[in-house]
Structures are given as structure tokens and as C-alpha cells.
Image (cartoon, rainbow, N blue to C red):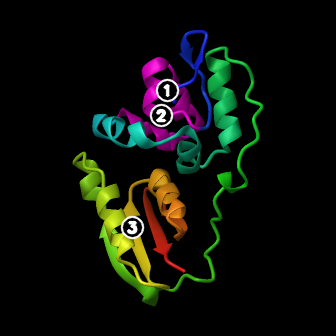
Amino acid sequence: MITLHNDHLLITPQTKVADLLEAFPQLEQVLVEIAPAFKRLSNPVLRKTVARVTSLAQAARIGGVPVIELIQRLRREVSQPEFVDRLPDDAVPDKEQPAWFAEERVVKRLDARPMIESGEQPIGVVLRDLDGLSKNEIYELITPFEPAPLIDKAKARGLTVWSRSIGGVEYHTYFIKT
């Protein structure tokens, strides 16, 4: 559901990046200033695919910025009132390697970077693969950014997830059924 404020999109953590940039194209440069990782939004393929399913809360995780800071800055730029809602406790993911992770327990890997670069969304493939996991098996996904929307979908399906950055240009995300 898109909420309007004075005939414009009201910016919240649930706002999709594509909706934000459609309503306020001038905010693309602001996003890049906030987090250089958002430079990828200039890629038309990512803009048409990933930006359509990525919320600002998920984008904040990808960019490594506090979601409240992102929302407040964007709202200030377009003269919207300060955001005062409480954020969920899991808005900031745990970046420490979890006790359940062991490289030898990885049973399947998918390097989704070529798919993403060609405009495909790997979400369907990954969700099918995750459905095939047995208890305590780990699935590894490699992407050019933290796949926040996919992480949220996997968590909603009861999986445990951990993502780590390799030099800020490659992300390895691990999923486990416990």
C-alpha cells in the first residue's frame, strides 16, 4: 500500500526504492550521498528489478546506514514531517559469524551475480533451493549487494540467515533450516 502525503508518496521504511525515485527523482543523488552503494541505482537493470522489490528499510541494510537516519534525511529533503514510528527490533542485522555456520555444512551455492547483471531476479530459484534444504544444511548465495528482500522472505519461511560482505562489492548470504 502506498501512503500519500500532500498528494505525494509518504516516505516510510516500507516504501519501495522504485516508488520513492518515481515520486522524487531528485532523491537518487541524496541516496548516493548517504551511501555510495546506492550508485548501483543508476544501472537501469537494477532499477527495474531490485529497486521494485526493495524497501527503504532493506536498502538501509544494503547501504550500511541506520534506517531511521535514511528515512529522516529523505523526508527532510522533500519537506515531509519527521518520522516518529518505532522500528522493529530486527531492523539491524547481526554481522558476527553465527555459531551455526560451518563451511563444510554448505550443501549448495549459487553465484547470482551474472543473473542480476542480466536483469534476472534469482529469488524464485533461491526460494526453490531453500525449500529443498534439509535440517542443518546451509545454502550459500553470492550477490553484488546484500539481498535484503530475499533475506526477509527466507526469515518469514522460518530459515535463519547470515550475510557477510567481501570488500563491499560481493555478499555471501547463508541460509539454514534449523
Numbered label attached to residue 20? 1
Report the residue marked by disc 2: 17
Q: Which label's residue is closer to the chain start, 1 or 3? A: 1
Query: How far apart are the two marked residues, 2 and 1, measured between alpha carbons?
Result: 5 Å
x and y, in percent, of residue 28 in the image: 48, 27
Q: Residues within 10 Å of mark 1 (few under 14, many from 20)?
A: many
Tag 3: amino acid: Leu
At 52% across and 23% down in the image, what residue appears? 27
Q: Are marks 2 and 1 in contact (CB under 8 Å)?
A: yes
Report the residue marked by disc 3: 141
Label 1: which secondary element: helix
Q: Residues within 10 Å of mark 2 (few under 14, many from 20)?
A: many
At 62% across and 77% down in the image, what residue appears? 98
Label 3: which secondary element: strand
Query: How far apart are the two marked residues, 3 and 2, measured between alpha carbons?
Result: 22 Å
Tag 2: amino acid: Val
Tag 1: amino acid: Leu
x and y, in percent, of residue 72 in the image: 69, 29
